[in-house]
Image (cartoon, rainbow, N blue to C red):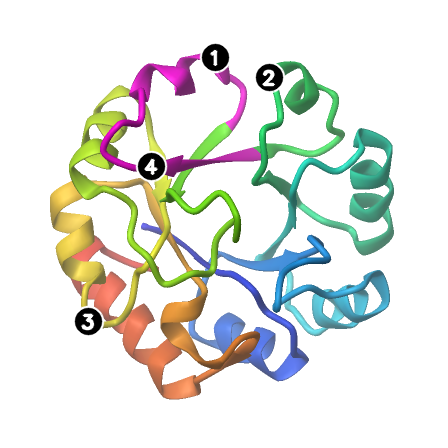
Amino acid sequence: MWLKICGVTREEDARLAASLGVDAIGLVFWPHSRRSVDVDRACRIAGALPAGVATVGVFVDEAVEKVRLVASQVGLHFVQLHGAETPQVCRQMARPVIKAFGVGPRFDESVVDAYPEAIVLLDADAPESKGGTGMPADWEVAARVARRRPVILSGGLSPENVAEAIARVAPHGVDVSSGVEASPGIKDAERVRRFVAAVRQAGGQA
């Protein structure tokens, strides 16, 4: 079970996540997010990680050239596109792409078929905030998408509900942000530990 801790803003939170065996951390470059980091801070956080823990940069409808520049400066392993980016935009990125979709009851799961090269992430349907709301994705719809292709499930996950989410959706991976926080961008160490333990128990190694 692939596991990402997103919205990391501090080196100590990155080190904690790495020590627990997570696969990736997320660095948010959307300036309207309360978890946004600049390139300098992102470089410091990335530098605190051991080899084997991937860095994912989160962008929202950003110019391709800007995304490619930041990815190069920070040494990102993946770029996560959380806006209305087209398949053509995804193909222009110099890094593997995670394409996020807001999933509500009326989501057309066939939309993901237009992005065959991207890794699909399913988040809550919250177009104004672009993630980190604590709201869940629609798990019934997400489960249908997960039967079409491997997905990363995000949106409203927490130590209390991630086992149920894994059982109901059967995702390839999970992604958490606000569900393990003391405040926006500040991770709660105990909640991070509990989340990782719950994922391991429900879906194998984190």
- SS at mark 4 in the image: strand
Q: Which residue is mark 1?
A: 114
Vertical position of residue 113 compared to residue 59: above or below: above
Q: Considering only order in the chain, which callout, 2 or 4, is on the residue closer to the N terminus?
A: 2
Q: Earlier in the sequence, mark 3 or mark 2?
A: 2
Does the magenta run of residues contain 31?
no
The disc, 1 or 3, on the residue closer to the chain's N-terminal end is: 1
- N-term mark: 1 or 2: 2
Magenta region, residue range: 98-118
Q: Which residue is tagged 4?
A: 103
- C-alpha gap between disc 1 and disc 4: 16 Å
Asked if marks 4 and 2 touch (Cβ < 8 Å), the reply is no
Question: What's the mark number on residue 160?
Answer: 3
Q: Which residue is mark 2?
A: 87
The residues bearing labels 1 and 2 have C-alpha atoms spaced at a distance of 7 Å
Q: Of residues 198 and 90, which is closer to you in this image?
A: 90
Q: Which residue lies at the image location 19% right of the left edge and 64% below the top edge?
A: 161
